[in-house]
Image (cartoon, grey):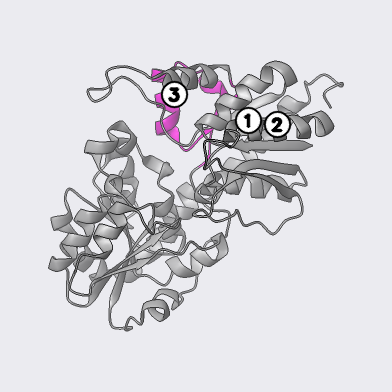
């Protein structure tokens, strides 16, 4: 079976759960083709599998160029005329909107891979934009919707009025196995002594993740503790990042801004001692409050046996229930959280992997997605097959 994935933005490598789905599909001998844009700041997706192929178009950077959407649409048309895919998966908002338009002609089964909550009316947003309204309609028309967890599923049924039966879940977890080793990647990269504890913030960098406040809090951390920001794409030149990098934090803050492939990311993460994940409710609103299993950095920490310090949100309470993390109300509480975890480190680390296996491990979720896809495929007209 041929499956096509369309993602307008050049950041497939930043979407662990979508990569995981494609990896499992390829292992089941599905032929997966990804059509996406490319941009130098974002790494190309890394797969070692002949069943996954890529068609890249250069993201528009000049007004005289064809719009990125038109380039993607043309590549889709060429591919579909020859391969006639049964399922087409949209990997971001504009990719899904484009697929919904093309579906009027090609008649495939559209799977909406939902990364972030759709916009709704809030105190900060008193009206929906044209794109917001379009996204709602596309979600309602999609054949299947894949999202991160039951928090997202409930939101879609309550706010967007989707039928719960067409929503499947997949935590934002990478496709590699649980890590049971340690490494020296970050220590060797920055020359950090084995006597110092490394607190890692992996993934995005910006005000949404309270990175400035996090860096400033290190002034009150134990002397034997350092913070490392590792980014999922090249942030050099970004004003927020440059301000952080040019601020002195008593030699306690380091920046790793070279993205690494999924397999190398595991080695990098497991060379830290504690993972940290902060979210600004003020900026993200409900997208932070109900983050849940969309927080890919948390999944990666747990898989590598790192205890987690995270913002005190209802959707993160499982971290305390599994005794693998501590939830905080403000950055002032980080120092105490580090000390508590350090005193019981082996227990917290062991529980992190137990939690990942129980709640995050993607295999059972992907198998259910594939089961539903194969079950529904049996009802397709033979001319499509």
At a point 60% along the width and 26% down the height, the residue shown is 98
Left or right: where 263 falls relative to 317: right
Q: Which mark is residue 283?
A: none
On the question of residue 277 being in view, the answer is no
Q: Secondary structure at mark 3?
A: helix
> Is residue 197 covered in magenta?
no
In-front residue for pair 129/366: 129
Mark 2, other Cα within 10 Å: few <14 / some 14–19 / many ≥20: few
The percent position of residue 370, horizontal first and vertical second, equals: 67, 37
Mark 1, other Cα within 10 Å: few <14 / some 14–19 / many ≥20: few
In-front residue for pair 13/87: 13
> Is residue 156 covered in magenta?
yes
The residue beneath circle 1 is: 70
Is the C-beta separation of discs 1 and 2 under 8 Å? yes
Compared with residue 55, is residue 121 higher up or lower down, i.e. above or below?
A: above
The residue beneath circle 3 is: 156
Q: Label 1, label 2: how many angstroms apart (C-alpha)?
A: 6 Å
In-front residue for pair 232/61: 61
- The magenta region covers 142-170
The percent position of residue 337, horizontal first and vertical second, equals: 20, 61
Quarter of the image where one finds residue 95: top right
The residue beneath circle 2 is: 74
Q: Label 3, label 2: how many angstroms apart (C-alpha)?
A: 31 Å
Mark 3, other Cα within 10 Å: few <14 / some 14–19 / many ≥20: many
At a point 69% along the width and 24% down the height, the residue shown is 109
């Amino acid at each position: 079976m041929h499956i096509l994935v369309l993602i307008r933005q050049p950041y497939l490598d930043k979407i662990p759960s979508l990569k995981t789905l494609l990896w499992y599909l390829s292992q089941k001998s599905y032929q997966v083709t990804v059509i996406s844009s490319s941009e130098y700041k974002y790494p190309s997706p890394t797969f070692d599998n002949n069943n996954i192929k890529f068609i890249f178009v250069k993201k528009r950077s000049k007004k005289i160029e064809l719009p990125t959407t038109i380039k993607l649409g043309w590549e889709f048309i060429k591919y579909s005329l020859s391969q006639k895919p049964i399922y087409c998966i949209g990997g971001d908002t504009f990719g899904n909107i484009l697929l919904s338009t093309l579906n009027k002609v090609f008649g495939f089964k559209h799977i909406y891979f939902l990364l972030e909550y759709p916009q709704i009316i809030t105190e900060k947003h008193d009206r929906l934009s044209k794109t917001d309204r379009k996204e709602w309609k596309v979600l309602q028309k999609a054949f299947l919707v894949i999202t991160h967890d039951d928090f997202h599923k409930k939101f879609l049924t309550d706010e967007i009025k989707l039928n719960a039966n067409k929503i499947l879940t997949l935590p934002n977890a990478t496709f590699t196995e649980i890590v049971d080793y340690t490494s020296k990647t970050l220590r060797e990269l920055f020359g950090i002594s084995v006597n110092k504890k490394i607190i890692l913030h992996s993934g995005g960098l910006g005000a949404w993740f309270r990175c400035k406040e996090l860096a400033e809090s290190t002034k009150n951390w134990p002397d034997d503790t350092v913070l490392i920001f590792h980014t999922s794409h090249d942030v050099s030149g970004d004003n927020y990042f440059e301000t952080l990098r040019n601020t002195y934090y008593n030699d306690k803050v380091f920046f790793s801004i070279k993205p690494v492939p999924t397999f190398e990311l595991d080695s990098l993460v497991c060379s830290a001692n504690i993972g940290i994940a902060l979210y600004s409710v003020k900026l993200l609103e409900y997208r932070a409050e109900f983050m849940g299993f969309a927080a890919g950095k948390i999944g990666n920490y747990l898989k590598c046996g790192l205890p987690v310090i995270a913002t005190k949100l209802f959707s993160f309470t499982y971290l305390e229930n599994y005794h693998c993390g501590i939830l905080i109300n403000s950055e002032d509480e980080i120092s105490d959280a580090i000390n508590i975890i350090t005193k019981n480190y082996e227990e917290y680390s062991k529980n992190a992997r137990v939690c990942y296996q129980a709640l995050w491990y993607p295999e059972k979720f992907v198998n259910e997605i594939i089961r539903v896809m194969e079950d529904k495929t049996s009802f397709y007209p033979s001319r499509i097959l």
